[in-house]
Image (tube, helix red, strand yellow):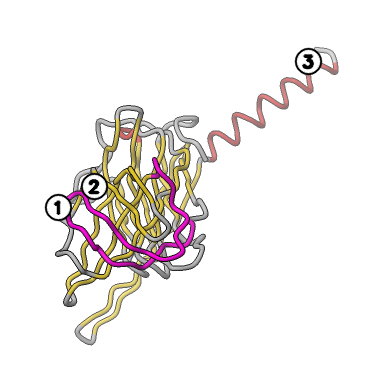
Amino acid sequence: MNETEIIGFLIMCLLFALMMLGITVTYNLTISGGGLSAVENVSVTGSGQAFANPTCPAAKSGTLTTRTSGTAGVITASGHSIVVGARVDVYWDVGGVEGSAYGGIVSAVGATTITFAGLSGDALPIATSTVIIAKAQVDNFGCDGDDIVSLVAKNNAQRSIFTYADAGGDIYSIEVGSGAPFYWKTGDVDDNPLAGEAPTKVWISSAKLTEDTGSMTHAITEIAGTGTA
């Protein structure tokens, strides 16, 4: 074996070793209430991953001035920068009851108005309600849902919506609260939310009224190369 062959062989061994090492993520879970507190460290190991952490533009607070239906309407919000064709999510807290809807498409805009339709999720609140409208950002998130061994979505400081999708449309959507992440791992009682699916991207929005970099989602997969990081 000549020098070139030896170097090539060593590189192949190194790549194989890195694949075998896998990816391990440790989650610190804190449970408290009723005077009790417990902390649990949970480690999940796989060979591939998908990760998204886009910068979400500042959301705008406004008023639902026209409620065309539970999925469509007009929001008045001064100083917005939303354009026709944008995908938007809407958040609200009316009388202490939070709600949200995702995936609306903007059909018209004015200096202070945004007309949209096609929301999914909760039905819009009554007209004149104070709402927050946020432009959703898209990021790559390619993986085979059946290979996922853990899935996390979080924002430590703000309400945020994550919608996993493929070329055919939305697959699964989850809203997380400030400091209240979504977490699933293999073996949990709940079903894998992406089982039988193959997301290629994730839409993410934040209700924060300034630019937000805190919205993050991460999946660990069993098979190397099935995710995009």
Q: Tell me the crowding category of disc 3: few under 14, some 14 to 19, or many 20 or more residues within 10 angstroms, Cα based.
A: few
Which callout, 3 or 2, points to the residue nearer the camera?
A: 2
CA–CA distance in space, label 2 to label 1: 8 Å
Q: Where is residue 101 shown, x and y percent of the image?
A: 24, 54
- Image point (35%, 28%), residue name: 167
In the drawing, does residue 33 fall left or right of residue 53? left
Q: Residue furthest bottom?
A: 35
Q: Which residue is mark 1?
A: 70
* Element carrying mark 1: loop
Position of the N terminus, as image quadrant, is top right
Amino acid found under the numbered disc labelled 3: Glu
Q: Where is residue 199 shown, x and y percent of the image?
A: 36, 34
Q: Where is residue 131 shown, x and y percent of the image?
A: 28, 66
- Image point (35%, 39%), residue name: 148
Give, as a single range, the part of the protein colored magenta.
57-86
Amino acid found under the numbered disc labelled 1: Gly
In this view, the residue in front, 124 or 197, is 124
Q: Tell me the crowding category of disc 2: few under 14, some 14 to 19, or many 20 or more residues within 10 angstroms, Cα based.
A: many
Q: Is residue 51 magenta?
A: no
In the drawing, does residue 211 fall left or right of residue 111? right
Which callout, 3 or 1, points to the residue nearer the camera?
A: 1
Q: Which residue is mark 2?
A: 119
Q: Where is residue 2 shown, x and y percent of the image?
A: 84, 13
Q: What mark, if any, has residue 5 been given in the picture?
A: 3
Query: Mark 2 near mark 1, Cβ–Cβ under 8 Å?
Result: yes
CA–CA distance in space, label 3 to label 2: 59 Å
Quadrant of the rendered image containing residue 133: bottom left
**First in residue order: circle 3 vs circle 1:** 3
* Element carrying mark 3: helix
